[in-house]
Amino acid sequence: MPMQDFCLPAVGGKALCLHDWRGKNNLVLFFAHSIRTCTLCWQRLVELSTRFNNYADLDAKILAVLPDSVEALSQDALVAGLPFPVLADELKKVHRLYAAQIFNATPDSAMLFILDRYTAPYVAWVGADLGQQVVREVESWLNYLEIQCPE
């Protein structure tokens, strides 16, 4: 079953919606804490950006959702250098919506989801210290999705 759609303002552009990718790409959807206060989330964003091309080779896109305003995110040098869209969820509405889908998640949890090209969730991780292992494991799941749903 597809995850609930959302639209959020993107840094450096217009609003982006989950349905923009439906039927096109698998998604790595990362809900982070504010990178101004959470160095672990900052590290995960850097790790995701270093794997950007690997994920693209597997027909996957990355979206990062941060609980900050577009204005604040637009002024951040790290965000400006990321090769994937960063969405502003200043009021954490989408964060709360997605946290409700995971047993041990709270509206303040960092979360990483892998969604198939129809936006159905395949796997999710919760916690600020998702770890390098999780970021590497994402590639295995994306490979699996390509085998299961190659269209």
Image (spheres, rainbow, N blue to C red):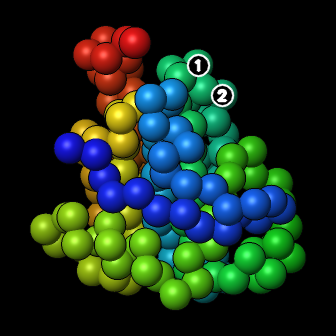
At horizontal 36% and vertical 42% (from top left) the residue drawn is 119
60 left or right of 88 in image: left
Residue 8: image quadrant is bottom right
Residue under pointer 2: 53
The label shown at residue 57 is 1
Viewer-proximal residue among 57 and 93? 93
Image location of residue 124, percent across then percent down: 28, 52
21 left or right of 88 in image: left
At horizontal 32% and vertical 23% (from top left) the residue drawn is 145
Image location of residue 75, percent across then percent down: 86, 76
Compared with 87, 35 (above or below) is below
Viewer-proximal residue among 11 and 139? 11
Viewer-proximal residue among 21 and 146? 21
Number of residues whose C-alpha sits closer than 10 Å to that of mark 2, classed few (under 14), some (14–19) or many (20 or more): some
Number of residues whose C-alpha sits closer than 10 Å to that of mark 1, classed few (under 14), some (14–19) or many (20 or more): few
Asked if labels 2 and 1 touch by Cβ distance under 8 angstroms, the answer is: yes
